Amino acid sequence: MSGTESVAFDTPQRERSADNFAIWVFIGSEAMLFGAIFLVFLIAHIDFGPAFAAASKHLSLPLGTFNTAVLITSSFTMALAHMFSSARRWRATLLALTATAALALCFLVVKGIEYGREIGEGLAPVLGLPFRYAGPDPVHAEFFFGLYFTMTSLHALHLIGGIVVIVGMMTLWRTASPANRVRRVVALGLYWHFVDIVWVFMFPVLYLINR
Amino acid sequence: MSFGIPFFPQEASSQAGQVDALFYTLLAFSVVLGLALTGLVVGYAVKYRVGSKADRTGKRSRSLPLEMSWTIASLVIAFIFFGWGAVLFLRRDHPPADALEITGLGKQWIWQFRHPGGQREINELHVPVGKAVVVSLAAQDVIHSFYVPAFRIKQDAVPGRTTHIWFIATEPGRYHLFCAQYCGTQHSEMGGWVTAMAPEQYTAWLNRQGEGETLAASGEKLFRALGCSGCHGPNSKVRAPSLDGIFGRPVALDNQQTVIADDRYLRDSILNPKKEIAAGYQPVMPSFDGLIDEGEMQMLLAYLKSLSPQPAAGAKP
Amino acid sequence: MTNATMPGTYLAEGSGPRAWLLTTDHKRVAWLYLISLTAFFFLGGAMAVLMRIELATPAGDLVSDDVYNRLFSLHGIIMVWFFLIPSIPATLGNFLLPLMIGARDLAFPRLNLASWYVFIFGSLFALFAVVAGGVDTGWTFYTPLSTLYANGWVSTAAFGVFIVGFSTIMTGINFIVTVHTLRAPGLTWFRLPIFVWTLYATSLVMVLATPVLAASLILIVLERIFGIGIFNPELGGDPLLFQHLFWFYSHPAVYIMILPGMGVVSEVLPCFSRRPLFGYKAVALSSMAIAVFGFLVWGHHMFVSGQSAYAGVVFSFLSFCVAIPSAIKVFNWSLTLRKAEISFETPMLYALFFLALFTFGGLAGLFLAALAVDVHLHDTYFVIAHFHYIMVGGMVTAYMAGLHFWWPKMTGRTYSETAGRIAATVTFVGFNLTFFPQYMLGFDGMPRRYHTYPPEFQFWHVLSSAGAVVLAIGYLMPLFYLGLSLFRGARAPDNLWNATGLEWQTSSPPPPHNFETMPVVTKPAYAYDMKGLEHERFSPHREEAAQ
């Protein structure tokens, strides 16, 4: 089975298209996961619009906007990695991958700062921390923050997963055949763009929709 | 019944006969179709067993007319059963206007009932025969379900909302009341009896229980004790909407929408007053979420309803 | 495994723990699943037997209410997530899918092995929950009972189910990609065996529905640990929202469980009738229809929950619609027997029993879809009986049919036909004795999940409990004669039943990469009416008699 990772395939081309397809199926599955949670948010938003609008104003718009920019840039570097790998420019590919992982890390750090601020202000209804909220209708504001932490941390977990895969891929880089390298970069790229798109939906829904 | 073995449950409400008519029709259909299919399969199995001399010419492994016809027949039969069931089901939402309203509260692991005259019962419910009874249900802790098999009725009691079930008992007697939704450790002990009695006996029974304070009267006391009357009362300094005749009336909201003041609206206005603000008023009312329990909520709702001209039961959603 | 005598087969590729636990051969992974699932099946079954013994008397005298509640909760959790959902796909499907489409393995062999480890990892949480003190929420985890009031190991069990969900999704993705990319030359979609169609349909549901369960379980765990109030009415949440999310997964999950069973029966019936499956296309497409419609009917679990009456009407309508493809299948299976040459080996007996039990379970579904009748029957033993007729009478019977049908392929050995037929019959009798009385109980108004009950229900409960003992014997028997066949069974020929599928064209057991020469397909599935296959056949029971 020359050049294929799975014994099931005759040629690397077939394996690559199978990989692509698998990632799309996986993205469909992921879309259902995020879809379910977005749906919960939507229903709660319809029910408690004013409380959610008020609570949303306590999130940091500058940090959120900055993070959105960071993540979109990481999608760009990931696209570069795809391009370079197709052209078999391995050094450039590795550089682009490193940049992608670094940008994602930057996103997580900023997100961490945001979390820290919110916990400091007493806006995090998690781990039994006291919830101090000055605005109207604190009960439903707490509900908003509960959803905010659930959704953003689920997204952050996906990002962490992506970083782990990038690091793993770079560790195994030297032993992988060229065909496998391209295949992996393409598959990872699809996943990466999906996780970014989830954020592109999450950002307006949490930060902007109520302004 | 036959040797004490229960085959068919009692029918003791006006709905029971109607539900059973559909049930037995379904049963007849299932038995006929089931036996026909069984007969067919067994017949084929015997006739075409390996080595038999049966004629096997003219085999076919597809037949579009046959497949089309059984698909269409299944659809038609399914839609008939669907329509029949749906028509009966939709009646659940429309209790007669003059129904007697009893409140029921489920909590782990008892049912509490309160009659319009204020008489309370636990795990027992006395109702008159031949008169429509609406039970408005609430739950204090987890989801419970009010189930009287002999009446063929069931309704979940869900925390945070009021649900309704109505029936007309037709046969005097004592019938099982069950909690049908699993609700924790003593779920199987949560239940008791519904006693259907002739109307005059029911009146006599009510009298024997004494003229307790009516639910609405309890609600009125609570209305004052919680300070609601301070703002909603006629001489208050704070401008709050008057609640006279509120139940069942349309209310204009500050977002140009209009809602009917039903159970849901009143409940939400007490627990979550910022959600739907009556047009022309400031959102100054505090939330009573966590300050009153389900039983007290039922009292307040009963009081608010009593401020509307009767009958109020017809205005249900 | 006595593999020493079978050189050249997948069983001869090493026998140490390493060779099994680090294998990426789909056939060996199937065995890993088969052994773990069998353990879970008997664990869940033991709980069921305990419950039935408790219910033989109206008073709660054998176990306390807390213990009883834990028994039925864990019985449900184990049977649904640790047996039924993976059962046919992860064992028979895993073993056969590549063989049936002429592939060397699944598309992602390592993902396949990983799915088993994820399954085991998740099951450790569930087992820990069992040992540590149990869960008493029912398998449905309804809020707010599960979030605010239950005191068992709810988060642990929910987390275990959550992890097993990943394993389900991995299997689903693997199967979908395999069917799309690895079919043998000439094997067009409408030449695929129905078993492959149903595995494909089931995988689609696995991939799209499981994440929604994951989301709702995450929310439950967050609510229990962090107190965010998504399902708590006091914090503005809605307990019914959980039911919507849960059933959005769990109703399709019912089809995850039954579809592969339908596939197995569609293989067995034609083989022992020596006839092509009647209405092949209708059966294939109705599997897809079931998978799609299955997503639209979740609200029929909630007719009396307080959701709007009009939602109830819509869901009832859709539920009647989803009954049609199942009815079509039953008619097609029955007509397959017409003008056939039927013989009654063990797999065929199981398949015929499936047909009967599935029909009577499915017809009961009509009662539950009819709104006004469901108001009476909802949350009673009628639902229990309906569910078990489909899941145990349907699914487990089909699983047994498949296991007996492909056992010679998987092991290269034949089992005792006599024992097999006796076990099948005992199972059928025991099953009906256990669950038919439960229809009566439900109609009489006996609610489900009751530890004690009014004495007038005792007659039916005693019948049901007696049946459970018979049923248990029926399920224990194969454990012995199938186990014995591994050591004493006669060598099976490559195509024992003279069947048409590609899996029968390689050796029994198959070589490590399934085929010595990769097959090319020129015929439709179930070409039993083509020359050369009509009359000749191997008949193990006749051979047994001759010995």
Image (spheres, coloured by chain):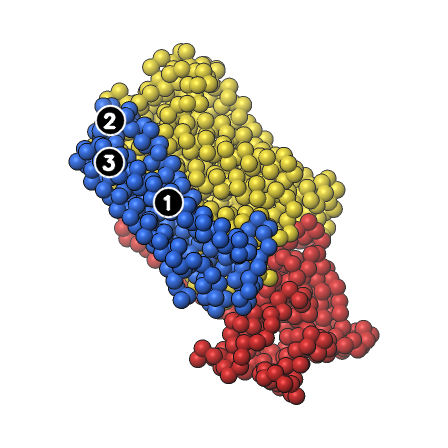
Front residue of this view, candidates B44 and C42: C42
Residue highlighted by disc 2? A177
Colour in which chain A is drawn: blue
Q: Do labels 3 and 1 share a chain?
A: yes
Chain painted in red in the figure: B
The structure residue drawn at horizontal position 59% and vertical position 31%, both measured from the top left corner, is: C473
Please determine whether, in this image, residue C357 is positioned above or below residue C528: below
Q: Quick one: SS at disc 3?
A: helix
Q: Quick one: SS at disc 1?
A: helix
Q: Which chain carries label 2?
A: A
Residue highlighted by disc 3? A93
Please determine whether, in this image, residue C326 is positioned above or below residue C268: below
Residue highlighted by disc 1? A106
The structure residue drawn at horizontal position 44% and vertical position 80%, both measured from the top left corner, is: B256
Marks 2/3 in contact by CB < 8 Å: the verdict is no
Q: Distance between the residues labelled 2 and 3?
A: 14 Å
Please determine whether, in this image, residue B93 is positioned above or below residue B82: below
